[in-house]
Amino acid sequence: MTPEGPASPPGRRGRDPVDVADLVARARDGEARAVARLISLVEDAGPALPEVAAALAPHGGRAQVVGLTGAPGVGKSTTTTALVGVLRGRGLRVGVLAVDPSSPFSGGALLGDRVRMQDHAGDDGVYIRSMATRGHLGGLAWATPQALRVLDVAGCDVVLVETVGVGQSELEVASLADTTLVLLAPGMGDGIQAAKAGILEVADVLVVNKADREGADRTVRDLRSALALGGRHEAPGAWCPPVVRTVATAGTGVEDLARALAEHRAWLASSGEGDRRRAARAAREIEAVALTGLRERMGQVRGSAALGALAAQVVAGRTDPFRAAALLLDQL
Amino acid sequence: MTPEGPASPPGRRGRDPVDVADLVARARDGEARAVARLISLVEDAGPALPEVAAALAPHGGRAQVVGLTGAPGVGKSTTTTALVGVLRGRGLRVGVLAVDPSSPFSGGALLGDRVRMQDHAGDDGVYIRSMATRGHLGGLAWATPQALRVLDVAGCDVVLVETVGVGQSELEVASLADTTLVLLAPGMGDGIQAAKAGILEVADVLVVNKADREGADRTVRDLRSALALGGRHEAPGAWCPPVVRTVATAGTGVEDLARALAEHRAWLASSGEGDRRRAARAAREIEAVALTGLRERMGQVRGSAALGALAAQVVAGRTDPFRAAALLLDQL
């Protein structure tokens, strides 16, 4: 599928033919520009996407994908930054993917308020990338798993994925992750509200950030009783989500958080739940791609000569809409 | 596809095997029970629907399908009843189909407030039927065209179709009809509002019912200027929707309305617009059936062994989601 023409000259970007296999090889060697270029190809969701996916498939599968969710203002960016510091301190390679489903823009320059990420700007053990999904069909479902795969293939031990902007995508992020980290802050959304929102169902680790503020004890207590009511820990061998207190701006509790993530990773491996989640995720991804393909083919059919001819046969009474639909589907 | 077993004993209904070809033959002879049974089969949208559609296909194509739309309280039922009387007076066979997308019930007993329809209860030149679409996938889009086809095949010259209950289906009814009749009443929704609602775009005949009430002149004037602004009559040979004044409860103006419908029918034939509408309708029907079929097949795939096996291959890195989706689609 790779064009047989000459490879792009160094330093050129844009619409040139791309040697995907070469990019993947260089990403595996840890070349940051190759990683960035592959994520751009994935983000465009253009014709290169299936080729990129095929080239990535044999590699990776080693990273722990950690999804961060939480209401705006709860401290997601700060927590991410602090967590990256702790994980780097342990010698782990880290990827950060910030997905903004509502923005038409992308790229590192748009990380905006995450100035503290600059702490890691010169560190070649960290890849930081924000990605827009541009509102195209199945954006988050399509492109994001492959972007995560790029970071995995590039040798990241942990990939943190976070949605920016509009809510509702919390549950989608959870469906992409091995480990889902739900952030709360005292006074904004207590345990009961979190339970109502269905967030406790998907949380593997709960973080009460800004834990030096008034009401933190109460929020922790509420969460613990909501979890107890949920009864998730009662099954033998089940994972009971820990509640971790952090003050991310001061780094307080972030070591505990990193430990909780590592414990969850170990549990995923020992319980078999990790394999189950990966399989379910792959199934959802296949379905999303298949459905998008079907919709596209139906779109091509609308107003086509084939549909027009079948409609004329129905009008003339030579066939009926059901046989015509079957013929149409055969042609897809 | 017809079961080879004995035909249902007379008087029995329900889940017995059905001889669809025999039912269609009897419906063509004008047997009211066969017409009712066929509409029930269509309404159930069960496995018999494609067979019924195939048996109906070679017949009919003669009826003028007239869609009635208008806000609740505007007098749709009364107008329908009065119109049936006038059309019957001209010796035409008439079908009436009342579609209620929001009701789980169906059948003549539920015509409820249309007590006046009793005027036609003993008349074997009129079929009256209400139909529920039970909220199943594509209900209105799927079942209604075939129910109209049943009434067409049964020899109706005119079939009046009307939605009961929730709005929003006005435009859908328009998409089913040869001739769309939009009802208004003085003081409820003037011409400007109708224009805003997009209703003037689809109207072939406008009716100001309750025209003995105050404000009727103004409503007629408003409609005429809104139509003039729309500029639909300016193209050569175009149809300019007439505005008919009626007092349906007294029968006033209903002859004019019947004349307008006949004129539109003649224009549909002479302009070629009738053929164009039928072809567009058939194309939409084929698409609706095809899309529903695709969704059903995807639904069967969810959680299937085939998808599970493909997901396992993706997890193992032996394939990628795009190749897996292509394989999945091949299996559909």
Image: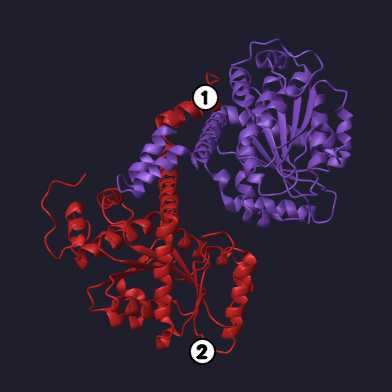
Chain colours: A purple, B red
Mark sitting on residue A280: none
Q: Quadrant of residue A1?
A: top right
- Give SS at disc 1: helix
Please state the horizontal and vertical placement of residue A54, each as a whole percent of the image: 58, 20
Which residue in the rendered view is the most extreme toward the front? B236
Q: Is residue A166 visible?
A: yes
Q: Is residue B135 visible?
A: no
Indicate whether B299 appears above or below A22.
below
Q: Which residue is mark 2?
A: B212
The amino acid sitting under disc 2 is Asp
Between tags 2 and 1, which lies in front?
A: 2
- Describe residue A129's horizontal placement relative to residue B196 as left or right: right
Q: Which residue is mark 1?
A: B323
Please state the horizontal and vertical placement of residue B296, each as a whole percent of the image: 41, 43
Q: Chain of mark 1?
A: B
Circles 2 and 1 on the same chain: yes
- Give SS at disc 2: loop
- Describe residue B263's horizontal placement relative to residue A158 as left or right: left
Q: Residue at x 52, y 32 (%)?
A: A286
The amino acid sitting under disc 1 is Arg
> Disc 2, disc 1: CB below 8 Å?
no
Kindly report the distance in space between the C-alpha atoms of the residues bearing marks 2 and 1: 68 Å
Q: Residue at x 67, y 50 (%)?
A: A224
Q: Residue at x 74, y 14 (%)?
A: A8
Indicate whether A127 appears above or below B211.
above
Q: Chain of mark 2?
A: B
Q: Residue at x 63, y 26 (%)?
A: A49
- Describe residue A269's horizontal placement relative to residue A310 as left or right: right
Please state the horizontal and vertical placement of residue B295, each as a whole percent of the image: 45, 43
User: Which one is in front, B281 or A278?
Assistant: B281
Disc nearer the start of the sequence (2/1): 2
